[in-house]
Structures are given as structure tokens and as C-alpha cells.
Image (spheres, grey):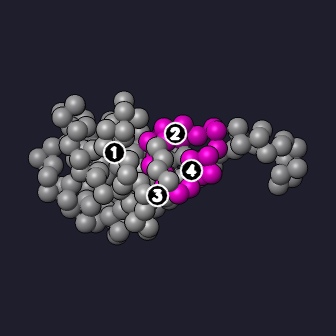
Amino acid sequence: QLLGYINNEVEVNKIAKSSMSISIKDQNVIQEAKLPRRYIAIALGGEWSFRTYNEWDKVVEKLLINDTNLNVIVLGSDNAIMSAKKIMDKFSHMNVFDCVAKFTFNQTSQIIKQAQILLCCDGGLMHSANAVNTPIVALFAKLTAQMQLTESICAFSLYDKNNVNNISVQQILQKYN
């Protein structure tokens, strides 16, 4: 038995899924933010350099070349402010929206919930996406997707044994498409 469940570890891995509740108040805050109706989200920043992707601006550039009508929302906490600035300096005239360090975790989770997909590295916002059932393209380093995700998660994962920055922009775009 695993945590009192009668299913074995393999069976639990097939069905286990995190969940979270987002208050009506937080949902309303995001509704009032007047974000686009359809968009993809990208989680910037990170606590560890080997799990912090530094080429999101190049990913955004390629995405917008492929679809000039695409709406992109960048998300993250204070550790993503410089990355967001880099992206906004390059793409402020495009459909790119900066939500970095502007909302609480639960409010950011509501933004993720409404996204078509979240591009991210292994971290808190990736787990938030899993909890609100948003598909992810997730970048992993050192820890594999199998160590972090269950089989019930809608994830398109990329892995490098040392550093997410060894994952190419092209690989991310292939998983996204």
C-alpha cells in the first residue's frame, strides 16, 4: 500500500495528479487584467541556474515569426524580472504581455489555467500547470520528467543531464508544434 491506497506504485503513477483551488477573488483579479482570450504562457526565471532557461527570447521570436497573431504571456516571480525585460524590450510592439512579478502565485496559476499551453522549466509554475490541467512543454536537467511528473500529466518533456540551456530552441519548438 502507498499512502493507504490499495493500488500499487505503478497504478498510482498512472492516475495521480496534483490539484489546487483558485478563489473567485483571484479569478476576478485575472479577469479584470484584460488579458487576451487565447494565448500561450512562458514561465521565466528560476532558483537554480541549471534549471533556468536563458533563451526564451529566441523561443518567443521564432513563435512570433511562425504566427504573428499569437499572444504570449510571460510569467514568473522576482527572479524573472530581467528575463521579462529582455523579452519586452525586443517584442513590446508584438502581442507579448508581461505578467512577471505582478500577481500572486494563485493568480498566476489562474493565468496558466487559461493558457493553451505553458512552456517552462521544472519548477513551481510547472507544477501549478499540472494542478490546473494545462498542457506543458517542460525542460528538465539532472532530474528527469519521470522523477517529477506522473503519467496522467499532459507533458511534452525535454531533458539534459546537466543544464536546461543545453536544450535548443529548435527542440522546444518541435515539442510545442
Which comes sooner in the sequence, label 3 or label 4?
4
Q: Nearer the viewer, residue 44 or 72?
A: 44
Residue, x 14% and y 52% (percent of image)? Answer: 90
Q: Is residue 74 above or below residue 64?
A: below
Residue, x 83% and y 43% (percent of image)? Answer: 8
What's the residue type where badge 3 is placed?
A: Asn
User: Residue 26 location, x and y as percent?
Assistant: 45, 56
Say few, some or many: other residues with alpha carbon within 10 Å of mark 2 (under 14 / 14 to 19 / 20 or more): many
Q: Nearer the viewer, residue 122 or 36?
A: 122
Find residue 162 and name its label: 3
Q: How many marks?
A: 4
Q: What stretch is highlighted in magenta?
A: 133-157
Which comes sooner in the sequence, label 1 or label 3?
3
Say few, some or many: other residues with alpha carbon within 10 Å of mark 3 (under 14 / 14 to 19 / 20 or more): few
Tell me the SS state at disc 2: strand
Find residue 144 and name its label: 4
Marks 3/2: CA distance?
20 Å
Q: What is the quadrant of the C terminus in the image?
A: top left
Q: In the rendered view, does 144 fall on the left or right side of 164?
A: right
Which label sits in the foreground, 1 or 2? 1
User: Residue 84 location, x and y as percent?
Assistant: 25, 59
What's the residue type where badge 1 is placed?
A: Ser
Q: Is residue 106 above or below residue 19?
A: below
Residue named by callout 1? 168
Marks 1/3: CA distance?
14 Å
Which comes sooner in the sequence, label 4 or label 2?
4
Residue named by callout 2? 155
Marks 1/2: CA distance?
18 Å
